[in-house]
Amino acid sequence: MTRRSKSSRRWLREHFADPFVKRAQAAGWRSRAVFKLEEIDRREHLLGPGMTVLDLGAAPGAWSQYARRRVGRSGRVIASDILAMEAVPGVDFLQGDFRDAAVLERILALTGSGTVDVVLSDMAPNLSGMDVIDQPRAMHLAELALDTAGRVLKPGGNALIKTFQGAGFQQLVAAARQRFARVRCLKPEASRARSAETYLLAMGARMV
């Protein structure tokens, strides 16, 4: 039987003691990440009835669950992830590697150009523990999400993208400011304090 490392055991202890994990389990959410989106939505009024939402890096599906509730029957949620995801009622899911041009084209075929109100991205790479490897991978995903937002959002649409403080972060923020009227960086309460993750909120997509 494989023994877990000390860091793995510590993570498991913290995970199951985490109040956000307990709240998510009690409420039927698929992960604690839902509370990050909920807090930002509550403060910024990001989602609403009738909206079309694209959720990138959706698995296990908590953000799609939340978005589906917020957009209501008149709205639409399209989700994508490299991993398989158990179906979320009312959500159109496409499995594939977002970095693959063919997968991106399939996403664009589902959404169309200039039809989406909000792009959500909670994507993150598998972490190696080496910043020199992990940071470029994370920034690449964030850049792809921002580029995709530019292709699918309606004028005035919004994007919420996970990113990480470090090399390339300021360049990403600068790129977002060229494309959106208002850009903010947010650290919701459910984001662990020791994590370098932050959320780029870009609002008011400009017509290019």
Image (spheres, rainbow, N blue to C red):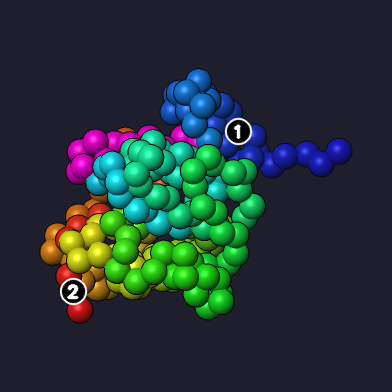
- Residue furthest to the right in view is 1
Give the class, few, some or many, for how many residues have Cα within 10 Å of label 1's Cα (few <14, many ≥20): few
Q: Residue at x 62, y 55 (%)?
A: 83
Between 98 and 208, the one nearer to me in the picture: 208
* Residue type pointed to by label 2: Met
* Disc 1: which residue: 12
Q: Which of the image's four quarters has the C terminus?
A: bottom left
Q: Is residue 42 above or below residue 76?
A: above
Residue 30 x/y as whole percent: 53, 35
Label 2: which secondary element: loop
Q: Is residue 120 visible?
A: no
Q: Which residues are magenta?
A: 31-45
Nearer-N-terminus badge (2/1): 1
Q: Is residue 34 magenta?
A: yes
Between 52 and 39, the one nearer to me in the picture: 52
* Disc 2: which residue: 207
Instruction: Tell me where residue 12 sits by quadrant.
Output: top right
Q: Is residue 62 visible?
A: yes
Give the class, few, some or many, for how many residues have Cα within 10 Å of label 2's Cα (few <14, many ≥20): few
Disc 2/disc 1 C-alpha distance (Å): 46 Å
Residue 113 x/y as whole percent: 34, 71
Between 141 and 11, the one nearer to me in the picture: 141
Q: Is residue 53 above or below residue 142?
A: above
Give the label, 2 or 1, closer to the camera: 2
Residue 165 shown left or right of residue 80 in the figure? left
Q: Residue at x 28, y 56 (%)?
A: 117
Label 1: which secondary element: helix
- Residue furthest to the left in view is 181
